[in-house]
Amino acid sequence: MTSQRTRMRMVERLRNQGIADENVLSVMGSVPRHLFVEEALASRAYEDVALPINYGQTISSPWVVARMCELLRDGSSLENVLEVGTGCGYQTVVLAQLARQVCSIERIGPLLTRTRIRLHKLQIRNIYLKHADGLLGLPEAGPFDGIIMAAVTTFIPAALLEQLTVGGRIVFPKGTQKQNLCVIERNAQGYTETTLEEVNFVPIVPGVVKS
Ligand code: SAH
């Protein structure tokens, strides 16, 4: 139930659900998603659902991860990506195979500690994790050609907009009750925003949780 065949079935389902980026599909066919959830939930890891990862948070469903990565890439390779909301680290690892470097920020300390151990075991070297409030971004590691938010918000703070390269994009869920995926692109003139599919995310929360 956690085998390569199960992963391939997930990839086929994603394809049928409209995911067209072959690079994203190929990466999702290789990352062992069951290692990112509790053992008791491992057999459900490849279903198209969000699953609990403790501390009131959830691992995003495979379709959501695939769609956000596809929108972030927009067909080209990524250089320096910022992820806000590391959670269990699954999306972080997928992004790390689509970008040269991924910086990921998580506000809940104990959740990040567990993710650090998991990523250390997987020996992925191009991920930089930080325990901080992602709403402030990570100016010391920017600018970023891609920023992904894994929690819903009503607006993108100026600090994050400023850390985006010209030509870069932010992919995030926007809303309150009704939420949609949104893409903000930065061009020489300013920023444009596109609203896409309806989604369902946990909310972004300011500040950090230490223990
Ligand atoms: N991609 C993750 C999603 C986890 S849920 C996964 O699939 O596991 C969203 C995550 O965003 C939670 O872990 C939550 O703690 C985190 N989060 C919420 N607000 C945040 C903030 N201001 N800064 C950093 N992380 C935040």
Image: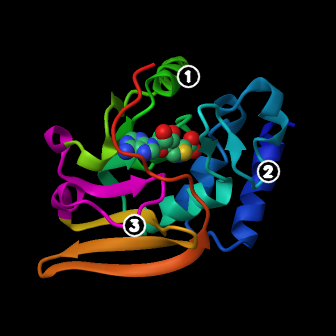
Of the image marks 3 and 1, the number of the one nearer the N terminus: 1
Callout 2: SS:
loop
Residue identified by numbered label 1: 118
Q: Residue at x 50, y 53 (%)?
A: 203
Q: Residue at x 19, y 61 (%)?
A: 158
Q: Position of residue 96 (x, y in %)?
A: 43, 42
Crowding around mark 2 (Cα neighbors within 10 Å: few <14, some 14 to 19, many 20+) is some
Question: What's the residue at 57%, 76% (across, down)?
Answer: 197
Which residue is drawn at the image coordinates 52% and 36% (left, top)? 89
Q: Earlier in the sequence, mark 1 or mark 2?
A: 2
Whichever of labels 2 and 3 marks the residue nearer the N terminus, that label is 2
Is residue 154 found inside the magenta-colored segment of the image? yes
Q: In this rendered view, identify the residue nearer to me: 97 or 92.
A: 92
Residue at the spot of label 2: 47
- Asked if the residues shown at circle 1 and circle 2 are in contact, with their CB atoms under 8 angstroms apart, the answer is no
Question: Which residue carries the number 3 mark?
Answer: 154
Circle 3/circle 1 CB separation < 8 Å? no
User: Quarter-wise, where is residue 127 in the image?
Assistant: top left
Which residue extends farthest right?
1
Q: Is disc 2 in contact with disc 3, using a CB cutoff of under 8 Å?
A: no
Q: Is residue 69 above or below residue 209?
A: below
The amino acid type, in three-letter code, at marker 2 is: Glu
Cα distance in 3D space between marks 3 and 1: 31 Å
